[in-house]
Image (cartoon, rainbow, N blue to C red):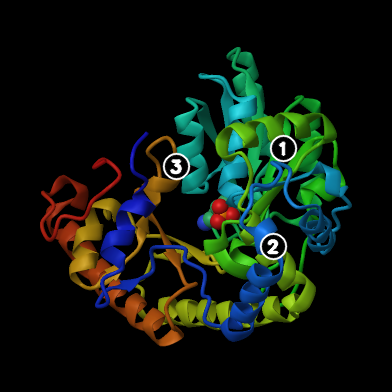
Amino acid sequence: MTASEVRALFAVASRPEVVSLAGGMPNLAALPLDSLSGEVASIISKDGLVALQYGSAHGLPELRDQICEVMALEGVTGHPDDVVVTVGSQMGLDMVTRIFCDPGDVVIAEGPSYVGALGTFAAYQADVVHVAMDDEGLVPDALREALRAAESAGRRVKFLYTIPNFHNPAGVTLAVPRRAEVLDICRQHNVLVVEDNPYGLLGFDGQTYPALRSMDPDNVVYLGSFSKTFAAGLRVGWVLAPHAVREKLMLAAESATLCPPTLNQMIVSRYLATHDWKGQIKSFQSAYRDRRDAMIAGLEQHMPPDCSWTVPAGGFFVWMTVPEGVDTKAMLPRAVTARVAYVSGTGFYADGFGSRQMRLSFCYPTPERIQEGVRRLAAVLAAELELSRTFGPIHQRPVSGPQVPGPDIA
Ligand code: PMP
């Protein structure tokens, strides 16, 4: 195991003078804290002996019912018995990988992919094969090719890990016509699909897409989370698995944590029962839309020619590609010196690609700070390009500036 690029960056990015376009912290400013604190107090005073006690590894029944209502917004018709509540969807990822993967097995994932998932796959010694995306998400022909190549090399492919909506880090969404095709390909090759969907309800125009799980319930394990639609710090997520997998998930959950935190589940359940949670999601959508707009306007105004970026219709992230000659990892210390942080693209690939890419997150800073951050970043990039034209590719120069802990430093 190694420290992820994102985790190492939290330390630097939290300095107040740095505009952090690096971390993916949700913006909680819009949450109704006063009424929430009243609800928490009432849970403790009325049901404290339950809230502060162990529970079942399955999760609270009333919360599992409510989770099914949440998933119904994306067409999923799962049974509450098949939902297992987890400590964030990160735990779901860990459990699914633990159940399915032996060392040397192959996991197919989009390239780039979520850094936390790559860390989990590496921890279980699974090999990641990346499949290309375009503006419409995962490319079905590339998936076919990757599966064929793995099979003819005698490799065992255990599952496709995919983030169909408002991808982290790529910012793209799998086009609806492609969804059935991707599911068909996986079925033909006998490969399970792990659908990771923390951002699906955060479409900026309120649009949702049919979950893969809704289209092929028997071959899709669905990972959900309240981290982006309510409160990440409560660490409540879930897995909806085909019935045959559910027992294994519960055994894995028991051995990892005994049970998910009862109090936190009760808080989420109470919130869903008593608050206008759909209205709250709308206000998250509009806050993130304003921030996305600020970032895209800043990029259009300030970035040097030959940079390109995705324009996400939801979620937290823009994926930017910079011109030849710039190495985004080598440039990072100079960006931090200029008081702006991002995550370089290499953290999102298991195979060393991504040195001309970076992830820019717009979820946390204010629109004004985002524009300022993008302006600073553009100036660093312009200087970097100038140097690369004069002296050759930047990654061959020694790195100067403050030492930023990187993924190679544990
Ligand atoms: N999957 C993806 C794609 C994510 O972006 C994240 C969080 N950044 C997670 C899973 C983990 O989320 P949770 O807080 O539910 O563990």
> Which residue lies under the disc numbered 3?
349
The image quadrant where one finds ligand 1 is bottom right
Q: Earlier in the sequence, mark 1 or mark 3?
A: 1
- The mark nearer the N terminus, 2 or 3, is 2
- The disc labelled 2 sits on which kind of residue? Met
Question: Position of 12 compared to 165: left or right?
Answer: left
Identify the residue at the far top of this view: 154
Q: Is residue 130 left or right of residue 85?
A: left
- Residue 193: give its label: 1
Please name the residue shown 12% across and 60% down the image: 401
Q: Nearer the viewer, mark 1 or mark 3?
A: 1
Q: Earlier in the sequence, mark 2 or mark 1?
A: 1
Q: Nearer the viewer, residue 135 or 369?
A: 369
Q: In the depicted view, which residue is nearer to us: 20 or 11? A: 11
Residue 43: x and y in percent read 68, 70
Q: Is mark 3 within 8 Å of ligand 1?
A: no
In the image, taking residue 276 as reference, residue 258 lies left or right, namely: left
Q: Which residue is mark 2?
A: 266
